[in-house]
Amino acid sequence: MTLLCVPILFDDPALALNDAREARDRGADLVEFRVDSFFTGLHDQFEAQVASIASLIERSPIPCILTCRPVLEGGQYDGPDDARISLFEHLSTRFNPTPQYIDIELATYARSANIKQKVNLAVDHPAQVRQVTTGLILSAHDFHTRPPDLIRRIENMIAEPAAAVVKVAYRARSLRDNLELLDILAEVRGGKGVGGKPMIALAMGPFGLMSRVLAPKFDAFLTFASLRRNTATAPGQPIITELLETYRFRSISSTTKVFGVIGYPVEHSLSPLIHNAGFDAITFDAVYLPLPVPPEYEHLKATLPALIDHVHLDFHGCSVTMPHKEHLLRLATELFDEGDGRWSIDPLARACGSANTLTITRDPRGNATRIALSNTDASALASILREHLSPGTPNDADTQPLIAILGAGGTARAAVAAALSVGGRVVIINRTHDKALALANDFNTQANGTRKHAEVRVATEHDLMNLKPAAVINCTSLGMQGGPAPDASPLNDTTLRNLPASAVVLECVYRPLNTPLLKAALSAGLRIIDGANLFIRQGAEQFEQWTSHPAPSRLFDRIVREELQTPTPQA
């Protein structure tokens, strides 16, 4: 079983003990006492500091790792090595209870035969003649990048007889660095593989969460999670409640399927909350992760195929958000044209010019046999329109509902495709007339003279009062929290008051829930549908594609609305 360890910075003994108790209560298996900011290595303070640390270890409610990390490997200790090694020797041989493990860096351990000998006196190993129970975690860290000699470092650590556990951690340059670490864990597999030793392999930084959450899938010895966001001891550590509650860490096993959301940024995405809760609700063996991919197309092109074709990951699909929806369609088209026949694009996604959902089918050996793209933004919007609009007379275009699309970007393109798919007539309204005209022309040109839908037209806000639309869909960022105009509405009050009383105003923005447009529309007596409704619908359709099981939509709705009423946490 992969253990869950909470690191605790030891400055104040009472606070450290309280944190250890809180870690136990929240579900940690062990704690790591980081004493490098407390222990000075000064001779006149040595005995008192050792006694204080020993007292903490004695009162710790769960087993502990003791670490005194030097500055060179990301810690705060800048004293002499011999004092630090003496600290470990005293605590492992002269007190009871002792630390379960001490963590020593490979660079320190291998620096001299004298240091190695002193460390070996303090830890349990095959040649130990003393009554010692403390194990040695031999570690290597790089807080800047993947070390060029990574494999050599791992081999050297595994080769040390005194090492009970091998640990490597470095700052990931991209999601792909996680895959190498997962391969290493798969090869070692909990001490049953190469070298016969359990291993910790973690990617640090914003790209490294995958390695931390998936540690039990690959039988890693442990993973770290902080108690609070401001107590992390390495960049990218999740907090323990996220790991246990959102990602259901205890449920992850070697058979767990992996899903996620690709975009940039994705750290505040609501998708992990709903999909992981949904998997739990139907007892589906899967986990859903944020998967940050920098905004340029080349990053997606390098990363997504690597995730799909990784032999150990069990990657079965993902949501795709900004700025990669158009990139995903481009990638699928390019790879299909190059001869990879596994890729397919559904007609609605093709009409949108973008896709937000990837579904991967695998054979019994885990090979990807089909990679399907769809656009559930559009299909969810289409289903909402069908529910709220009255259909016109068949084969009579003039009786079909008129749907006004506000905006001319990617969201507007998906809305046009959705509106046309339900037989609606479409008019586009955008502050930049040329962009609206270009979008309309794209759809009108697609028909190539055999158009099955009415011509997509362009209008102004003033025209809207005379057009009498059945629905208005806001696809702009106006009113969005954190956007360029959070207090603005794309339509003024006069326009809204002159819309038909039966008209429905649909908002694509869901932060905040109640946008300026929705407030004004409600005051004008119109029906409104908030952006959370659309987000939940498109997520539910993704969930059903991936699991072949009805989505727990009420659960999704409760989670999303509760989360949107809560202030966004600060890192």
Image: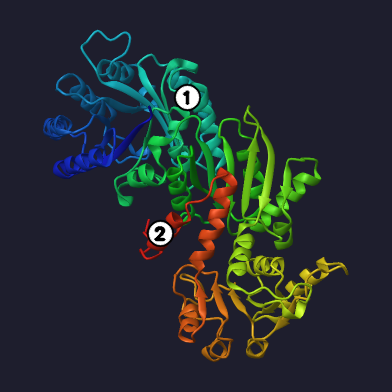
Q: Is residue 140 left or right of residue 55?
A: right
Q: In the rendering, at what x and y percent does residue 151 appear?
A: 52, 26
Residue extending farthest right: 449
Q: Position of residue 261 (x, y in %)?
A: 54, 50
Question: For the view shown, which residue lies furthest in the front direction?
Answer: 393
Secondary structure under the numbered disc 1 in the rendered image: helix
* Relative side of 347 to 165, left or right: right
* Relative depth, front residue between 30 and 122: 30
Quarter that holds the C terminus? bottom left
Tag 1 residue: 154
Res. 218 visible in picture: yes
**Precedes in sequence: disc 1 or disc 2:** 1
Mark in the foreground, 1 or 2: 2
Front one among 125 and 309: 309
Q: Is residue 277 above or below residue 429?
A: above
Q: Amino acid at mark 2?
A: Arg
Residue, disc 2: 558
Image spot of residue 164 (x, y percent)? 35, 19
Q: Nearer the viewer, residue 448 or 524?
A: 524
* Residue at 11% over, 33% down: 48
Number of numbered discs: 2
| Circle 1 residues within 10 Å: few <14, some 14–19, many ≥20 | many
Residue 431 x %, y %: 64, 82
> In the rendered view, does 257 fall on the left or right side of 303?
left
